[in-house]
């Protein structure tokens, strides 16, 4: 049997890593056999069995550890650090959107939404997670709110940041204009279905066999709390996930636009399963299926937003920034600071474009991105509610192939009338969002006038 090089420092490894015990005894056995030529030679298999008996560790664990050591000359340290998810990662996009709308509701009711009142409203809602004040502040920060101290009696009034408001109003202005032009508008998005899960709450009418999606909808979250289902017991929820990507409009889901595949990881975020290559290939395939001059609405997922050109940033070396600028025909006058070079880069806006947008433009289509943290502006989210409810309610085998059949069957039953209802609901939400800044401004102006009047008295 080949003799491997002896381990250099054994003691620290034993202290920090139980795998070190396996390596230490393994090296000790090899050394004793080398020193005593008359002692019986153990085969590799016999060595594993002996180590297992001495240490009380399973043979499979010892075999894997020795294999790692023989291949790499070392063994990995166990990861003792528990990566606990942060509160902003525990709360899904629906809940975050619901929290934003609750804050807006305060303004619409002509009430200034201070943190303590928002906290009560959230914790009284059975469909939202319970938060403490510290967690709420973190969530609001993630949603691009900043706290304004108006006066002593009104501490910590959360207001949305100006750049987010600008993005939202720009989007609303563009989508209004495109609708006025009668442009066909499509909405795409991704979701996932847990193969081993049934829905405990469904969005249904009185009939148990037919979901009436033409009814008036209050909000995405209300879709989950209309009625309770009965019958099947809900499995653990663990197991296979089906990743689903589709696109639709008021004409219904686009025929041939479905992409679904089994999740390959245990990630809690379905977006980890999709990369820019998968998405771009799907996008190329579905683009010819859309009407001429179509508008394609999507969110700002990273794989939706890959730049067409590699743009210099502050982490680039100065020499590389200069080379990039000169390759674009720019003349550099020396001496020059990196700050001024990056300023020149920002002026070349024709290179700061998304690959997806340019491809769509080349095919006489337009990509329009929903502002961050506004999933409620995509009507396909309501379609996902309908599809998931059907699949989860009728899922009796918890087999992947059967879930795919249920998915495809219900997608065929999502009619243009349903989609028109989804889009109509979103248009109502758009109108509320368009008006909310005016309401906030009016209330804040009144507060400031009241304060000025009291100060002068």
Image: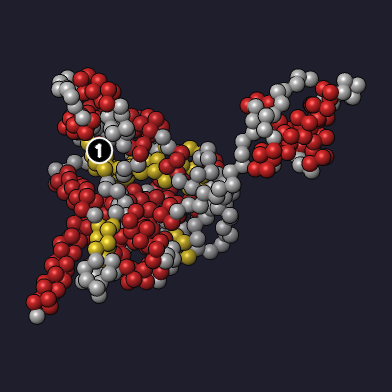
- Taking 329 as reference, is 315 left or right? right
* Colour scheme of the picture: secondary structure
Q: Looking at the picture, how far across and down is residue 334, in whole percent?
A: 17, 22
- Where residue 452 sits, quadrant-wise, is bottom left
Q: Nearer the viewer, residue 74 or 185?
A: 74
- Looking at the image, the residue that sits furthest to the right is 38
Tell me which corner region of the image, top left, top right, bottom left or bottom right, holds residue 141. bottom left
Quadrant showing the N terminus: top right
Q: Residue 376 appears at what percent x and percent y? A: 31, 54
The residue located at (46%, 39%) in the rendering is 273
Residue 365: name its quadrant: top left
The answer to whether 368 is drawn above or below residue 88 in the figure is: above
Location of residue 244 in the rendering, given as x and y in whole percent from the top left corner: 43, 42
Residue beneath the point at 82% across and 22% down = 34
Kindly identify which residue carries mark 1.
367
Q: Position of residue 240 (x, y in %)?
A: 55, 44
In front of the other: 200 or 139:
139
- Closest to the observer, 270 or 55: 55
Q: Is residue 356 visible?
A: no
In the image, residue 107 above or below residue 426: below
Label 1's element?
Answer: strand
């Amino acid at each position: 049997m080949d003799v491997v090089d002896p381990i250099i420092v054994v003691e620290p490894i034993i202290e920090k890593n139980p795998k070190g015990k396996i390596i230490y005894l393994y090296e000790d056995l090899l050394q004793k056999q080398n020193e005593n030529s008359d002692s019986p030679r153990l085969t590799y298999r016999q060595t594993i069995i002996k180590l297992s008996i001495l240490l009380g560790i399973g043979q499979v664990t010892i075999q894997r550890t020795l294999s790692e050591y023989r291949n790499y000359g070392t063994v990995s340290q166990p990861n003792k650090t528990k990566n606990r998810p942060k509160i902003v990662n525990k709360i899904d996009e629906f809940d975050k959107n619901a929290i934003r709308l609750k804050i807006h509701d305060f303004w619409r009711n002509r009430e200034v939404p201070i943190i303590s009142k928002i906290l009560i409203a959230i914790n009284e809602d059975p469909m939202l997670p319970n938060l403490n004040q510290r967690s709420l502040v973190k969530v609001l920060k993630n949603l691009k709110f900043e706290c304004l101290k108006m006066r002593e009696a009104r501490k910590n009034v959360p207001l949305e940041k100006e750049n987010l408001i600008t993005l939202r109003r720009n989007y609303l202005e563009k989508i209004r204009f495109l609708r006025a032009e009668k442009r066909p508008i499509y909405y795409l998005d991704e979701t996932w279905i847990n193969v081993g899960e049934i829905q405990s709450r469904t969005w249904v009418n009185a009939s148990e066999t037919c979901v009436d999606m033409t009814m008036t909808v209050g909000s995405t979250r209300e879709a989950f709390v209309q009625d309770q289902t009965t019958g099947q017991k809900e499995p653990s929820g663990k197991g296979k996930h089906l990743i689903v990507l589709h696109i639709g409009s008021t004409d219904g889901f686009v025929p041939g636009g479905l992409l679904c595949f089994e999740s390959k990881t245990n990630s809690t975020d379905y977006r980890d399963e999709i990369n820019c290559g998968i998405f771009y290939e799907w996008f190329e395939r579905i683009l010819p299926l859309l009407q001429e001059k179509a508008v394609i609405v999507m969110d700002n997922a990273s794989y939706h937003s890959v730049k067409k050109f590699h743009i210099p940033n502050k982490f680039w070396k100065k020499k590389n920034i200069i080379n990039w600028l000169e390759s674009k025909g720019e003349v550099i006058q020396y001496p020059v600071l990196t700050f001024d070079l990056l300023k020149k880069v920002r002026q070349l806006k024709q290179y700061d474009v998304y690959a997806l947008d340019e491809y769509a433009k080349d095919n006489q289509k337009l990509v329009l991105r929903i502002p961050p943290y506004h999933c409620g502006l995509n009507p396909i989210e309501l379609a996902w509610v309908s599809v998931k409810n059907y699949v989860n309610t009728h899922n009796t085998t918890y087999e992947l192939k059967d879930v795919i059949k249920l998915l495809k069957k219900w997608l065929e039953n999502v009619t243009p009338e349903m989609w028109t209802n989804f889009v109509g609901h979103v248009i109502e939400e758009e109108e509320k969002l368009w008006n909310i800044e005016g309401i906030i401004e009016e209330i804040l102006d009144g507060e400031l006038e009241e304060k000025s009047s009291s100060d002068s008295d």
